[in-house]
Amino acid sequence: MNVRSYYARKLHSLLGVFPLGLFIIEHALANYTAFEGGPEGFQRSVNFLHNLPLIFFLELFIIWLPILFHGIYGLYLAYQSDINVGRYPYARNWAFVMQRLTGLITFVFVGWHFYETRFQVMLGNVTYDELGSHMHQIASDPVHFALYAIGAIAAMFHFANGLWAFLVSWGITVGPRAQRVSARICMGIWVILSALFILSLVGFNNEEFALTAAIAAGGSVR
């Protein structure tokens, strides 16, 4: 491994935790308000986030550019990977394979989710006030619900397992015992974040979001 590749891998690992890991946690908590607080709670979260000062630059440098680098370089790493679970069927080998597989799923899922939400806002097809009802339309379709659930679970595994690898590669968890403990903690993070996103989809599926959209449009709900 040359010096350029070494630092690129380090940057890729770092960005997966800071800032993207923090963004994932924030996104999970913000979306969960759809389950806990309904349309009003979710809209408060949306308004708070998008009224932050310099929001365009915050999103550009904290979300979109890190996602692009982490995603594209991650695809390159997956292409270069030597998958050897057939010869060495150890748990960490399977985790390595799952990290590459969920990375690919996450890359596609994030692109699709961006197209269905933020890109539609950019085109003017959806406003920030309509994001809740727009997500209701997505979540109320069984196929979309299932695909979103799969994408969210895969993305949360990719983050949690990547966090474990980050702690090892950056010399934070050195010994076997520390790595076993961190593995359990990271898998707990995977379960919790996955549950938050699934509950968010359940929340968006609530007819209250459709009712709110109809009232805002001056229509009615059948």
Image (cartoon, rainbow, N blue to C red):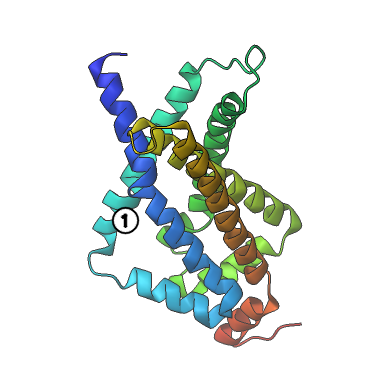
Residue sticking out furthest to the top: 87
Q: Residue at x 58, y 31 (%)?
A: 95
Give SS at disc 1. Answer: helix
Q: Residue at x 64, y 11 (%)?
A: 87
Residue tagged by mark 1? 59
Which of the pair 10/182 is nearer the observer?
182
Viewport quadrant of the N terminus: top left
Work out whether residue 126 can be spotted.
no
Residue density around tag 1, few if under 14, some if 14–19, many if 20 or more, within 10 Å: some
* Image location (x, y in percent) of residue 217: 57, 83
Splitting the image into 4 quarters, where does residue 84 fall?
top right
* Image location (x, y in percent) of residue 68: 37, 39
* Image location (x, y in percent) of residue 12: 35, 34
Query: What amino acid is at disc 1?
Result: Glu
Report whether 90 appears left or right of 128: right
Report whether 162 appears left or right of 153: left
Splitting the image into 4 quarters, where does residue 170 fall?
top left
Viewport quadrant of the C terminus: bottom right
* Image location (x, y in percent) of residue 15: 34, 41
